[in-house]
Image (cartoon, helix red, strand yellow):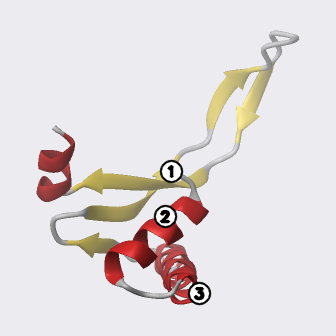
């Protein structure tokens, strides 16, 4: 499911217009992104939680040349599914 299909599904399930559902999805993405950038954790009970994990600098290899390279440290978004979501999937 892509973003436009998600907007359509939310609009039909909730009775919102597609424009309102689009604004809700965009707002959710913006708010979660802002919270994660501030190093906050976003938890939705039953659905799951979004958090930031810090990945350390490490050594790697260029696959074309085999030369050793340094891969910079970075923040990675992590999602852990909640119990309700896990139950629905399984």
Q: Quadrant of the C terminus?
A: top left
In this picture, is 34 found above or below 57? below
User: What secondary structure is found at the residue carrying circle 3?
Assistant: helix
The answer to which of marks 1 and 2 sits earlier in the sequence is 1
What whole-number distance in Å separates the C-alpha atoms at marks 1 and 3?
18 Å
How many numbered marks appear? 3
Of mark 2 and mark 3, the one earlier in the sequence is: 2
Q: Residue at x 47, y 76 (%)?
A: 32
Does label 1 or label 3 sit earlier along the sequence? 1
- Say whether residue 3 is left or right of residue 89: right
Q: Which mark is residue 19?
A: 3
**Which quarter of the picture shows residue 47?**
bottom left
Query: Helix or strand or loop: what does disc 1 sit on?
Result: loop
Q: Residue tagged by mark 2?
A: 6
In the displayed structure, does residue 62 sit left or right of residue 43? right
Q: Residues within 10 Å of mark 2 (few under 14, many from 20)?
A: some
Which residue is under mark 1? 1
| Residue drawn at the location 17% of the way across and 71% of the way down | 45
From what the image shows, is residue 48 above or below residue 37? above
Compute the Cα span from label 1 to label 2. Answer: 6 Å
The image's mark for residue 67 is none
Identify the residue at horizontal 16%, vertical 49% (top origin). Answer: 88
Disc 1 to disc 2: CB gap under 8 Å: yes
Q: Position of residue 24 (x, y in %)?
A: 49, 85
State whether residue 24 is above or below residue 60.
Answer: below
Find the distance from the CA under tag 2 to the CA under tag 3: 12 Å
């Amino acid at each position: 499911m892509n973003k436009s299909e998600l907007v359509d599904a939310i609009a039909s399930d909730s009775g919102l217009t597609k424009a309102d559902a689009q604004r809700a999805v965009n707002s959710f993405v913006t708010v979660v992104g802002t919270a994660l950038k501030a190093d906050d954790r976003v938890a939705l009970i039953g659905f799951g939680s979004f958090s930031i994990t810090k990945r350390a600098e490490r050594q790697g290899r260029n696959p074309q040349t085999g030369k050793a390279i340094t891969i910079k440290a970075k923040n990675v978004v992590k999602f852990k599914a909640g119990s309700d979501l896990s139950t629905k999937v399984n």
